[in-house]
Image (cartoon, coloured by chain):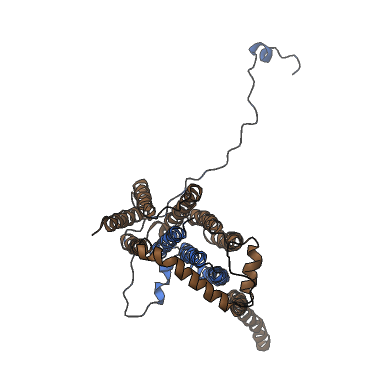
Amino acid sequence: MSPESWLYAGATVLGAVGMWLLLPRPGERMRWVGAAMSVVSLGLILSQVSALGDMLSQSMFIVIGSTTVISAAAAVTFRNPVYCAIWFAMMLLGTAGLFMIQGSHFLSVATIVVYAGAILVTLLFVLMLANPRGNAPYDRVSWEGPLSATAGIVLVGMLTMTLGGVLKSKSFAADMPSELIAAQEAQADDQADAAGPVNILTQDHSASLGARMFSAHLVSIEVAGVLLLAALVGAVAIIAHSRAAQPEEAKSAAQVAMQAPSENGRDR
Amino acid sequence: MNEVSLLHGYLTIGALLFGIGLIGFLSRRNMIVMFLAVEMMIQGVSVSLVAWGRYHNNWDGQVMVIVMLAVAACEAAIAMALILMVFERSGKLDIAFWQRLREDNQPEYVDRELPPPEEEARQWPQLSPAGVEPEHDPEETAFRTHV
């Protein structure tokens, strides 16, 4: 095995044991040991990513990327579900930062608005309605912690090892420009109505994204709209159904109560 | 900026998010945390899609992520409605409660070494002292003229 493979294998083992120690389980958890092992594993994996070539971008990427991943690990390992939700919000902020580095500003804002603004707040509502304290027994155990940690981290290890092998090979980097140029030419032929070549780092980012979205992807947008409507109706139907069950029983009970006096009256 | 390195970094982060979300979905028993883990896996895929869009210099990756946002919002609405309804029936957010839906020939999962619920130390509110009794002059109490 090459040194890279050993490094990935070490990162996988460290990460699996670290995540297992972090997951909730009864008894002494040794969470700090688990956190340290997970961070070392993350550092090993990130050390294999080749440099961006620009000091500022590189440090921004490392800081925001590791914030995202560490918040993600915290979001699935904290016992109190409220803390999980808050760490999930931190992960969303990190993802929005990653999108911003990629130059997709609209998505970055949309992630914060839709996820952190709408989905997470709904989730916190449900959480507060259901169980605000994190001392339920089922929050303090996991299903098969070692097995699930191993499954997830082995998946990560295999993916990152393959990525490192493919993306760092000389042929991939050498093939890239001609392939990119060919793809761009094909695209230019494809969208003959669009003015000028495609550049996703353009200044009028949202306008170009919207133009692309409402021309080439119009059907997807229509489908997404129908899906949203269906989800709205479905959610209302689910809640209304569970609400309707109780008045039905109450009504029948009331009918019984109404009938009983009349029978008594008939007897009289 | 080196585009291949950017792609590599983003795909690595996407893989990590997906794997951590998978761990959370497999291991946690609280339905809301399981839902969070699924959203985390969706975020991992979104990061990868945006990276590929940047690499190939087209908009389709970002458009796909916008459609995924819509799907995630629908999923959140339906999941929250279902979780609330299920919570009304069982009184807990534990997914293991619903093993009663299993087939007849499947064995029941019995919790081993389930910890007892932690009793929170009750913090009763305490009134702050309204004032301190002053030092009494014994002579004044003995020879008080105005009482």
Q: In the figure, A157 relative to B143: above or below?
A: below
The residue at the far left in this view is A1
Whole-percent x, y for residue A188 in the image? 57, 74
Whole-percent x, y for residue B73 in the image? 57, 69
Q: Residue at x 33, y 67 (%)?
A: B110
Q: Residue at x 45, y 53 (%)?
A: A52
Q: In the figure, A147 relative to A94: above or below?
A: below
Evaluate whether residue B98 shows in this view. Answer: yes
Quadrant housing residue B128:
top right
Chain coloured blue: B
Quadrant housing residue A210:
bottom right
Lateral position of residue A24 relative to residue A219, left or right? left
The residue at the far bottom in this view is A266
Evaluate whether residue B76 shows in this view. Answer: no
Whole-percent x, y for residue A82 in the image? 51, 55
Q: Residue at x 56, y 78 (%)?
A: A190
Of residues A25 and B41, the one nearer the viewer is B41
* Quadrant showing the C terminus of chain A: bottom right
Of residues A251 and B29, the one nearer the viewer is B29
Of residues B108 and B57, the one nearer the viewer is B57
Lateral position of residue A199 relative to residue A163, left or right? right
Q: In the figure, B86 relative to A34: above or below?
A: below
Q: Colour of chain A?
A: brown
Whole-percent x, y for residue B130 in the image? 65, 31
